[in-house]
Image (tube, helix red, strand yellow):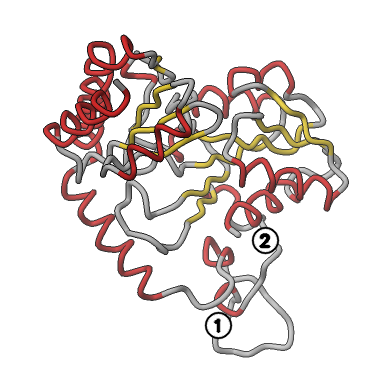
């Protein structure tokens, strides 16, 4: 719902522009929704191979560019500030998916000029399963943006029970219905824990955990037919590492059955999640050793 809201809002802020841009490697929900909004509004979707291709396609017809800050498979970090600057130079707006970056790497939406963003709270924000998503709207758009799923919580007078919808001032107009209170408590506690730790310390540990996985993979798993699919440069890698293996789908089931909780990502990826606040170095070593045993 959050992505739909901000994408529709972005398009409405750029009347006369009839193209959306996203990449073929983006998370399926993002790709599917961009396609749906394109069909709904009669817009053309321009498909690119990755974030580095934005400059080649963004132009006077571009309404919005939808990208993930951190790739859900490879963990590659996109240049949020640089890409946003290019899109703005062409007159378009940016919509960023932060699901694999928020709480894992520093994110500076205001400073980097992002227009809109969405994300989840159950991953690196530690709010747990079923926790609500969130959206961001840059303050410069607060008084102009509208969203298509209006409701009483986003109305100017929530308890006025007015005949017609009048949007609340500022970001509150992005709300629709009553928020899930129990899920919000999880977000509150998870974010408080992250704030106490500090994002710079969290990022430092994420980098160290990722480096540990890469070192062990090179020593133990590459000789068994694995390859590294994530960037090796620490500055370009988010909070997970993905390894490729020709038999990854079967091997992923074996690993999960034996207590190694990884994710299979088609076509041949085994994603190792490294939530810094809850994952220790000894756990990572034990998991990598078990992968070596089961894949050997």
In the rendered view, does 214 fall on the left or right side of 82?
left
Within 10 angstroms of label 1, few (less than 14), some, or many (20 or more) residues? some
Looking at the image, which residue is at 29% across and 53% down?
126
User: On the rendered image, what quadrant is the C terminus found in?
Assistant: top left
User: Could you tell me which secondary element the residue under label 1 belongs to?
Assistant: loop
Looking at the image, which residue is at 67% across and 33% down?
22
User: Could you tell me which secondary element the residue under label 2 belongs to?
Assistant: loop
Q: Where is residue 36 in the image (x, y as percent from the top left)?
A: 76, 49
In the rendered view, does 222 fall on the left or right side of 211?
right
Looking at the image, which residue is at 33% across and 37% down?
255
Q: Name the residue under label 2.
A: 147
Q: Where is residue 7 in the image (x, y as percent from the top left)?
A: 67, 49
Asked where in the image residue 145 lies, by quadrant, the reply is bottom right
Structural distance between the alpha carbons of marks 1 and 2: 17 Å
Q: Where is residue 79 in the image (x, y as percent from the top left)?
A: 49, 23
Looking at the image, which residue is at 49% across and 31% down?
71
Front residue of 63 and 122: 122
Residue at far left of view: 282
User: On the rendered image, what quadrant is the N terminus found in?
Assistant: bottom right
Nearer the N terminus, badge 1 or badge 2? Answer: 2
Answer above or below: position of 30 versus 178.
Answer: above
Answer above or below: position of 24 versus 246.
Answer: below
In the rendered view, does 289 fall on the left or right side of 74?
left
Q: Name the residue under label 1.
A: 158
Within 10 angstroms of label 2, few (less than 14), some, or many (20 or more) residues? many
Asked where in the image residue 31 lies, by quadrant, the reply is top right
Front residue of 106 and 89: 106
State if disc 2 and disc 1 touch (CB < 8 Å).
Answer: no
Asked where in the image residue 101 lies, by quadrant, the reply is top left
Front residue of 113 and 23: 23
Q: Position of residue 240 (x, y in %)?
A: 35, 32
């Amino acid at each position: 719902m959050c992505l739909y809201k901000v994408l529709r809002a972005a398009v409405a802020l750029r009347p006369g522009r009839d193209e959306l841009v996203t990449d073929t490697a983006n998370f399926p929900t993002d790709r599917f929704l961009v396609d749906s909004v394109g069909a709904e509004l009669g817009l053309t979707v321009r498909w690119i191979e990755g974030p580095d291709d934005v400059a080649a396609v963004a132009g006077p017809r571009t309404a919005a560019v939808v990208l993930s800050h951190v790739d859900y498979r490879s963990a590659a970090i996109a240049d949020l500030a640089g890409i946003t600057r290019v899109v703005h130079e062409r007159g378009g707006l940016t919509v960023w998916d932060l699901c694999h970056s928020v709480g894992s790497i520093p994110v500076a939406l205001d400073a980097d000029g992002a227009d809109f963003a969405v994300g989840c709270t159950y991953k690196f924000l530690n709010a747990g399963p079923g926790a609500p998503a969130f959206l961001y709207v840059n303050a410069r758009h607060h008084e102009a943006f509208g969203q298509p799923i209006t409701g009483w919580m986003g109305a100017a007078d929530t308890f006025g029970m007015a005949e017609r919808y009048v949007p609340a001032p500022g970001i509150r107009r992005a709300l629709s219905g009553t928020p899930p209170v129990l899920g919000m408590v999880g977000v509150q506690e998870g974010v408080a824990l992250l704030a106490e730790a500090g994002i710079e310390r969290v990022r430092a540990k994420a980098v160290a955990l990722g480096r540990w996985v890469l070192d062990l993979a090179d020593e133990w798993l590459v000789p068994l037919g694995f390859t590294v699919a994530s960037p090796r440069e620490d500055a370009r890698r988010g909070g997970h590492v993905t390894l490729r293996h020709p038999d990854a789908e079967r091997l992923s089931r074996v690993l999960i059955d034996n207590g190694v909780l990884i994710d299979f990502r088609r076509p041949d990826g085994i994603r190792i999640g490294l939530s810094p606040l809850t994952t220790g170095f000894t756990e990572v070593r034990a998991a990598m050793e078990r992968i070596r045993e089961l894949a050997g």
